[in-house]
Image: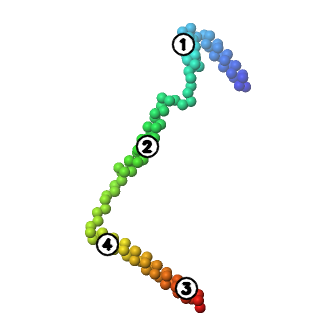
Amino acid sequence: MDKKLNQLTDEIINTETKNLDSHISDNLRESRQKALTQKTRFFDLSRFWLMPVTAMAALAAYIILPLLLSNSVPLQINDQQALSIVQEMDMIDQMELVEDLEFYEWLSSEDDLSTI
């Protein structure tokens, strides 16, 4: 089937090209020769610069845009608020000490019960 199709198309092309004007057939032959002699490259180096430039632009946008678009306002704390924050932090430390003390009291009571 494929061979028949190839033969049929070759015959049609050959008969049609014989009927062409000599100027057109010369141009066609020249174009064919150019197409066959051109080296086809797998990777076009003329556009190679596009990939690193695009990658750098994307990286810059990834880093800079969040910084520019963030609407962070510096927190303004007066002396009274700062004092209450420090007191709360001290209270948390004291609660940890109390919890440790309660644990050791419980542990000592367990030791006393185990000796009975």
Residue for badge 3 = 110
Residue for badge 1 = 27
**Name of the residue lying farthest toward the left:** 79
Residue at 41% of width from left, 48% of height from top? Answer: 63
SS state under label 1: helix
SS state under label 2: helix
Q: Is residue 3 above or below residue 104?
A: above
Gap in angstroms between the C-alphas marked 1 and 3? 105 Å
Q: Amino acid at mark 4?
A: Ser
Residue for badge 4 = 84
Q: Which mark is residue 9?
A: none
Residue at 43% of width from left, 41% of height from top? Answer: 56
Between 33 and 3, the residue placed more toward the observer is 33
Q: Nearer the viewer, mark 1 or mark 3?
A: 3
Q: Amino acid at mark 2?
A: Ala
Gap in angstroms between the C-alphas marked 3 and 4? 39 Å
Q: Which mark is residue 58?
A: 2
Q: Earlier in the sequence, mark 4 or mark 2?
A: 2
